[in-house]
Image (cartoon, rainbow, N blue to C red):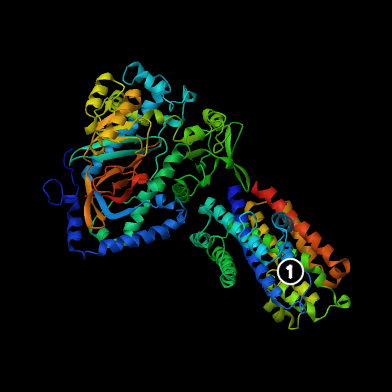
Amino acid sequence: MAAAFDEMKGTDGLARPAYEELAGWLGKIPPDILQQRSREAELLFRRIGITFAVYGESESTERLIPFDVVPRILAAKEWDTLKRGLEQRTKAINLYIKDIYSTRDVLRAGIVPEDLIFQNPVFRPEMNGQRVPHDIYVFIAGIDIVRVDSDTFYVLEDNARTPSGVSYMLENREIMLRLFPDLFARHRVAPVENYPDELLATLKSAAPATAAADPTVVLLTPGIYNSAYYEHSFLADKLGIELVEGRDLIVKNETVFMRTTEGLKRVDVIYRRIDDDFLDPLSFRPDAALGVPGLMSAYTAGNVTLANAVGTGVADDKAVYSYMPEIVKFYLGEEPILKNVPTWRCREAEHLSYVLDNLAELVVKEVHGSGGYGMLIGPKADKLAIEAFREKLKRDPRGFIAQPTLALSTVPTLVEEGLAPRHVDLRPFVLTGRDRTRIVPGGLTRVALKAGSLVVNSSQGGGTKDTWVLDN
Amino acid sequence: MLSRTADNMYWLARYVERAEYLARIIEATQRLTAVPTSDGATTNEWESAVATAGCAAAFFLAHKEANEQTVTDFLAFSPDNPSSIRSCFEVARSNARSVRTALTVEMWDAINGTWLELQKLGAGPASREQFANFLRWVQESSLRFDGSAYRTMLRNDAYWFSRLGVFAERADNTARILDVKYHLLLPPQEHIGGPLDYFQWAAILRCVSALTAYHWVYRESLKPWLIADLLILNDQMPRSLASCYAHLVEHLDNIARAYGRQGLAQRHARQVRTRLENSRMDEIFKGGLHEFIGSFIADNNRLGALITEQYLL
């Protein structure tokens, strides 16, 4: 594994242009000021965050995700490339999902193997031949990006179902504005606070043809016991829409209504944060108490928009991921602007034998896993773990993909001993509406707080940073 | 607004109000039992406290005997009693969480802070002194929540539903204490009790935090019929039945105006208020205080059912 690229110091140890001002500032301030601001940030999170967070609960430690006060900075030019790449990728994803549930050109052309779709539990036969409003399937995408050098960004993962984390992007900025007004005066940082407005505009643009002129949008949550509940209530609050649970909705004459104090009120767009499986007990899991009986009937009748659509898992499955560059080319006839991490598909014999021979150097992931669980990081694993994984892999090669161990870029991060480089990734949020695509500059930067660790997931010791996109 | 949100606001307010009332009952009973028997009543005060809290049936399923230990534990801390102070705050917090977006930061702070304190308490306070502090803290928590709602909420349906909860619960509490203690509140001509009842009367007033108010209103020593008048008909007294119904009618009217239509709940609340306005204490005594209170409790329960039917389902 090569030495990691540091986003502040670059390769020559001198501050890269986007970080010049910050590096100078960090060099001048009294040494304990960052620790002090960091403590203030935690207090603020508890106070501002208290509006949304569920702090105090026994499981709360996991929910108050550590926040690092040193921002991660992207130059305008870097962001511009990312933005074009993200737009291109989500455009292709939407065309691809539409194709999968209609004419399946991509399968007939042999770009993606059929069994990868039809034997995949995230494939929803209910969606076959089903048109969705404006042909948009993925209204909200969270596309995970990693960086390995000054020019190379890779897409690590496409999250096309119910990506979360945007509330941290918004809160992180609020906290930073309070703590470091001085730094903001020295930088021209593109704002992110318009995200809720952009999201609402996107959702409204997706209303079905039968909706009223000003469509009613709601956010459907599994309820207070869901680990992302605070984000759901935060967003509903910022969007000014009702936060509903399944039991608040009722389907009559293939139309969705919510129960209000003034009687039943029609619902046109549902920003759902419930998985497909739990949406409608009549269509999917019959024991799904969280869902709305009959919701799929209203959906297929075209009387309600679900954002994201049902069945988008066929796009963000890790097994499908490796075909994304071909998918982009197939639908758009363009070279992908954002590269994929080189990926070996263990389902293919040649790839498998390479992976088995090089386990100690590779990262091997479960095709259906998420959250950084169930994966092998070769260089960090001992012999025993590697051998155990080898057996697992041989038993079910289709269940795994492998990638080189990437030297994720680092950004200075405040740790006990002071500032130290820590690996980061980036999750920008791409909004696709009927009218246009909207991407708020930046996204959520996740940082692996343990020295040398590559796992940024909050469930495994990851933290977050504010992400700055500089104006020229 | 969502019916579930309105329902949560309504019950959130009810449970916080109930917790405060329970704390007052326990406090007043403790004082009463501290009075030498020769000066006080001979009945079991702790049994009476359970009845006043409206959970006698549930209590005697769990305990054989009503004494300070069993009753305070049951009313304050028992997780098995759905109306214990602990349960009230638990349910209130859980309701608050699911309607986070309808609450102001201050309200959430108040109820969440209370709940966090409660977690620290564990099985209950170790000493009598700590317990006394606990009871005061419960009342302060309720005041803080109520005050936050009053000072920070938008005056819209969310606010009105939470107020309906407060006043429906308050009316129920005041009526319940009158129902249990009615035999002590006799009209002047029938009143044969001696000074022995004095401490009972003071205890009743303490339960509804009206001891000082009594003196300001009547400027007399405690007379049982005046106590009844204060708690039933006096609309200056915030916990009187008349005052609660003035508020219930007001907030139901606000909702009806905002929604552009009224229903059975509005009509029923107005009827109850009119009956209170047109009543005089001597007539109430003539018809029987116990009967009057009994029919009021039934009416108040019916209002709760009507509000639920009309708005909360």
Question: Residue pushed farthest left?
Answer: A12
Tell me residue B81's x, y (percent).
Answer: 65, 55
Tell me residue A352's x, y (percent).
Answer: 27, 23
Where disc 1 sits, the SS reads helix
In this orientation, which residue lies closer to the viewer: A135 or B118?
Answer: B118
Q: Which residue is pictured at 47% across the width and 35% down the height?
A: A275
Under mark 1, the amino acid is Glu
Tell me residue B248's x, y (percent).
Answer: 69, 61
Say left or right for A282 vs B27. Answer: left
Q: Which residue is pictured at 25% across the width and 26% down the height?
A: A356
**Quarter of the image with the N terminus of chain A in it:** top left
Location of residue A151 (image quadrant): top left
Location of residue A184 (image quadrant): bottom left
In this orientation, which residue lies closer to the viewer: A203 or A394?
Answer: A394
Q: Can residue A105 be seen here?
A: no
Where does label 1 land, which residue? B45
Location of residue B209 (image quadrant): bottom right
Say left or right for A41 vs A8. Answer: right
Tell me if mark 1 has few (under 14), some (14-19) or many (20+) residues whose alpha carbon lies within 10 angstroms of its own. many
